[in-house]
Image: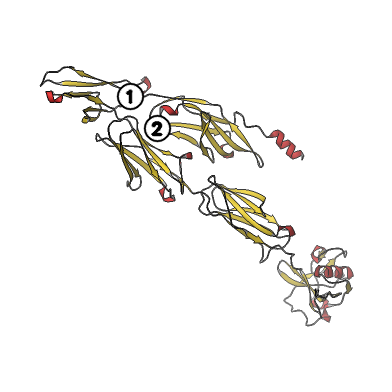
Amino acid sequence: MLLWSLLLVLAPVGVQSDWLSISMPPHAYEGDRVVIRCTGHKNGDIKRLKYFKDGSHIATYSSASSYTISNARFSDSGSYFCKADRKFFLFIDTTEETRSMWLNVQELFPAPGLTASPLQPIEGSSVTLSCNTRLPSDRATTQLRYSFFKDGHTLQSEWTSPKFTISAIWKEDSGNYWWIPVSQVSMEIQSPGNWGIEGQSLVLVCSVAKGTGLIMYSWHREDTKESVGRKSQHSQRAELEIAPVKESHAGGYYCTADNSYGLVQSAVVTVTVKVPVLDPVLSISVPGVLPFIGDVVELQCEDKRASPPVLYWFYHENITLGNTSAPSGGKGAFKLTLTAGHSGNYACEADNGWGRKRSEVVPLNVTEPPPKVRLVNGPHHCEGRVEVEQEGRWGTVCDDGWDMKDVAVVCRELGCGAAKHTPIAMLYPPVVDEALPVLIQVALCNGTEKTLAECDQVEPFDCGHDEDAGAVCEAVLPSTS
């Protein structure tokens, strides 16, 4: 009770603390890759890490991990903070929380303006179209690419200069002109935790910072370059759904975007596929052929395909025995010293964060261990030469000091009646084979022990089988009811 009181006093409340910290840039530009990183004083103690934006939960990780915004947008502006469940003391966990930090996503450049010089040209003369925009001072070296259009048709794409000259313009060149600079194509995974869950759906989002007209989007595997999907739409963002997700879908992916003015490819994004717990199997390992009272058995639970880490629970008749984790996958084990009350049905459950599953029931019948003493060659099982079992081998007992107290213990262990005599074993032929060892020189029982093994004993040093001990107990007839 004192230990529990101390734990309750020592366990901290989940409030802001210096143990967990958050780091991120205070501002970013649209299209940037932003990494939000939460770290603890000891990252190895973190069992679960959650990221929040404007008070809403956005991602959960089973260890210290960063949260990445692949292609920042204005909607990503907001207040971010983290919470972590960590090991505190022995089996006590506590929750830590960081302070909030604000992220401001800014426009990389304003919408451009188009000017023509001269504005009213004469047929046959040249005209220069100029795209006018500006970059912030800290991004002044960013290379923009320009495209010029007339009535929906391309005049020039992926142009590095903001000026485009028509060397000789004619009346039929009259119309509406505009331009759109094309920025980097990016791809991101739209899924909690930024990974796919086997059996569920996964969305790959391909987007462009700027772009006009009908855009052809295409998604590809990095290893084979094979296209896994295509879409054409008048949008700066397109989604490809993969359903149902399979373990074979894991790997690197990229997307491309093309509006007929030059294909642009995104960076490679790695898709990790997590396999949820599906079919945990419980097995019970016993030291011998049958489980006996006093044996130490091992309960083993395993779901061979589940992605780690996996937490296992063990149950006896739906009562929790305990739990254990498998951080790298594989089996979870729980040891149990058997008593008579441990007979019954056992089961286990496994959970790796995507739903808990229970195994089929495994029955266990615990019985009294067989006696480690026997009376051999007598008229019934309660009379004869005394033999004992030690470490899996049988042998005899020397009659040095052998008395009625020792016989009383043997009778009790065998379930026989009262002790009657201490005869020599020679009365129960044939004589023992010399290969059978003498295991006890002197048994020092006080007569109250339940088994001969509980008595103090002297190891053999000088005794032959002509000195083997015998015992006579009152015979107990089997019940006829």
Q: Residue furthest left?
A: 124
Image spot of residue 181 (x, y percent)? 29, 27
Q: Indicate whether 451 appears above or below 224.
A: below
Residue linked to disc 2: 71
Residue found 59% across the figure and 51% down from its top: 349
Q: Indicate whether 197 appears above or below 43.
A: below
Label 1 to label 2: alpha-carbon separation: 20 Å
Q: Residue furthest bottom?
A: 430
Image spot of residue 294 (x, y percent)? 73, 60
Determine if residue 170 is in view: no
Give the structural element (helix, strand or loop) at label 1: loop
Image spot of residue 66 (x, y percent)? 49, 35
Kind of residue indicated by mark 2:
Asn
Q: Indicate whether 141 appears above or below 343.
A: above
Image spot of residue 133 (x, y percent)? 30, 20
Q: Indicate whether 374 appears above or below 355.
A: below
Q: For the C terminus, which image quadrant? A: bottom right
Whether residue 475 sits left or right of residue 163 in the image: it is right
Determine if residue 240 is in view: yes
Residue linked to disc 1: 141
Marks 1 & 2, CB-CB < 8 Å contact: no
Q: Nearer the viewer, residue 432 or 6?
A: 6
Kind of residue indicated by mark 1:
Thr
Question: Badge 2: how crowded within 10 Å, few (<14), some, or many (20+)?
Answer: many
Residue found 55% across the figure and 52% down from its top: 330
Residue 164 in which image quadrant: top left
